Image (cartoon, rainbow, N blue to C red):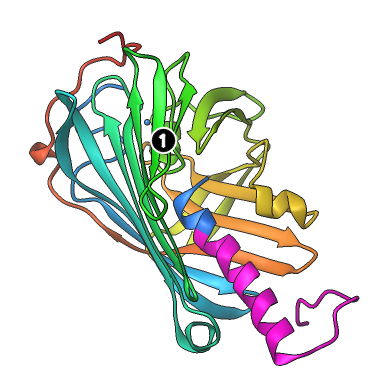
């Protein structure tokens, strides 16, 4: 069934706008929605997770999450996390969407130090960078398109939309046990609640049958809430805590992000990590 609004007539333009919106949800899920080192740490430099983005039964794009390396931000070693997504096939012909989001997650303190994004949607481009200064207690965002700079208070260690997913992977997750943390996005700080509510065995091509936990982040993404929808994250119930599936049901249709490939490197390449402590310097 095509995801049309009942009050909007079917036109090529109307179809394209709605298709772009649904694809956008999938791309956002790829880049929105972890403390001791060693081989049991859930992720390492060289890990690359690839995903297919579905609009209903159709593949509308591809996405990836990668731990690209360790770099210094303000004198702190940080995981350089890279999330990329783009439309493909017919979806790309109708409305091209391409994103690259980068995050720098402090190796020891597991808070974000820097976040950068570039998003192309049709003819529209959005680009910017946020720097998190825990000494000055400010998160300063620069819009590369307009040149405008905004700052908001930063009272506690925070995550950005990419680092939050890796941060969650370091946490013990169990049914009906709450996890709360702060995400700082644009000019707003959000307290996000995660509470796994279902465990079941699922099948994915890279993993085979695997136990997974279902989590519904609250609050959900703005685009999901606006379209009276809900969104769930499925994460593997093992030491890796792999993000396996993100699914959203909305009045405009359904979107899914499905794990399709896992690539890893030798964890010896990582720097040994200390126990996570709040950033105070």
Q: Of helix, strand and loop, which one carries label 1?
A: helix
Q: Nearer the viewer, residue 278 or 11?
A: 11
Q: Which residues are magenta?
A: 1-27
Image quarter hosting the C terminus: top left
Name above or below for residue 64 compared with residue 10: above
Q: Residue at x 42, y 71 (%)?
A: 86
Residue at figure coordinates x 24%, y 21% from the top left? 108
How many numbered badges does the structure rendering display? 1
Q: Position of residue 176 (x, y in %)?
A: 67, 27
Compared with residue 104, is residue 65 higher up or lower down, i.e. above or below?
below
- Is residue 17 located in the magenta-colored stretch of the structure? yes
Q: Quadrant of residue 78?
A: top left
User: Foreground residue, 5 or 58?
Assistant: 5
Q: Residue furthest left?
A: 269
Name the residue tied to disc 1: 169
Residue at 76% from the left image edge and 82% from the top image edge: 2
Q: Quadrant of the N terminus?
A: bottom right
Residue 219 picture location, percent across and down: 67, 37
């Amino acid at each position: 069934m095509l995801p049309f609004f009942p009050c909007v007539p079917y036109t090529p333009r109307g179809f394209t706008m709605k298709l772009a919106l649904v694809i956008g949800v999938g791309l956002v899920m790829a880049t929105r929605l972890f403390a001791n080192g060693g081989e049991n740490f859930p992720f390492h430099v060289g890990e690359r997770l690839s995903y297919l983005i579905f609009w209903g039964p159709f593949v509308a794009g591809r996405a990836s999450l990668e731990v690209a390396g360790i770099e210094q931000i303000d004198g702190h070693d940080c995981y350089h996390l890279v999330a990329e997504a783009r439309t493909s096939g017919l979806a790309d012909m109708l409305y091209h969407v391409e994103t690259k989001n980068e995050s720098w997650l402090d190796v020891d303190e597991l808070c974000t130090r820097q976040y950068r994004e570039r998003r192309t949607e049709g003819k529209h481009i959005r680009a910017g960078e946020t720097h998190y200064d825990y000494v000055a207690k400010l998160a300063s965002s620069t819009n590369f398109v307009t040149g405008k700079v905004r700052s908001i208070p930063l009272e506690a260690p925070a995550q950005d939309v990419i680092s939050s997913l890796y941060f969650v992977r370091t946490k013990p997750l169990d049914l009906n046990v709450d996890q709360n943390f702060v995400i700082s996005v644009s000019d707003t700080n959000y307290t996000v609640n995660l509470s796994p509510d279902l465990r079941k065995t699922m099948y994915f091509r890279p993993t085979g049958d695997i136990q997974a936990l279902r989590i519904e982040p609250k609050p959900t993404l703005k685009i999901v809430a606006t379209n009276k929808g809900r969104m769930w994250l499925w994460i593997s119930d093992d030491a890796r805590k792999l993000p396996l599936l993100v699914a959203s049901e909305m009045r405009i249709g359904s979107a899914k992000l499905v794990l399709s490939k896992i690539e890893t490197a030798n964890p010896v390449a990582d720097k040994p990590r200390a126990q996570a402590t709040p950033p105070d310097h």
